[in-house]
Each structure stands twice: as C-alpha cells, then as structure tokens.
Image (tube, grey):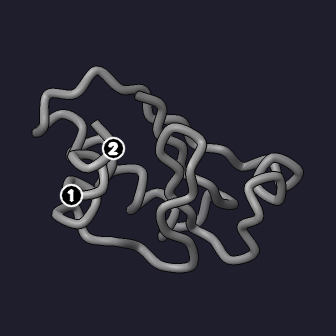
Amino acid sequence: MDVKILGSGCANCHALEAAAKEAVAELGLDATVEMVTDYTRILGYGVMSTPGLVIDDKVIVSGRVPSKEEVKRFLAGAV
C-alpha cells in the first residue's frame, strides 16, 4: 500500500503524516508513507487545499486533518 501526504510541510501536514504513520503501525499494514511537498505533483492529484491524504493514488481527504481513527478507517477500507 502506498500512502502519500500532500502539503507544503506545514504543521497540519506533519500532523497528518504522524497520524498516518501511527495508523499504519497500529493496523500492522505493509505500507509506505511519503510526504509530497512538490506543488506540481500535488496539483497532479487535483488537490487545491492541503493537507491531502492519498491512498494508492486515490485522493481520500484534502483541506483538513482527519483524526488517526479516521485515517485507520480509510486504510482499512483500502485493504
């Protein structure tokens, strides 16, 4: 599984990255979590408001920081 956090590197982006890493660990998933800060790549996903959460190249959330529990539900649904 491939998880990407889209954003500029702001506090909200780092909070989402931490939540995603914790969720992956708690679920015991074989997944990579990558922070994407390149605006060209971010726009390629159609995300206009960051942070964004992408699972297996599908945008799940943008413009807000979902809770760790929400991220866990998103990840479990993608398995």
Q: Tell me residue 51's x, y (percent).
A: 57, 67
On residue 73, the disc is 1
Horizontal placement of 75 versus 59: left or right? left
- The answer to which image quadrant residue 7 occupies is bottom right
65 over 23 or under it: above or below: below
Residue at (46% x, 57% y) in the render = 14
Horizontal placement of 50 versus 74: left or right? right
28 over 65 or under it: above or below: above
Amino acid type for the residue under numbered disc 1: Arg
Q: Tell me residue 52's x, y (percent).
A: 56, 63
Q: Nearer the viewer, mark 1 or mark 2?
A: 2
Task: Give the number of callouts.
Answer: 2
Residue at (56% x, 72% y) in the render = 62
Q: Tell me residue 37's x, y (percent).
A: 72, 49
Residue on which the image places disc 2: 78
Amino acid type for the residue under numbered disc 2: Ala
On residue 45, the disc is none
Marks 1 and 2, the one that precedes in the sequence: 1
Residue at (52% x, 62% y) in the render = 13
Residue at (71% x, 67% y) in the render = 47
**Quarter holding the C terminus?**
top left
Instruction: Tell me the SS state at disc 2.
Output: helix
Q: Nearer the viewer, residue 14 or 62?
A: 62
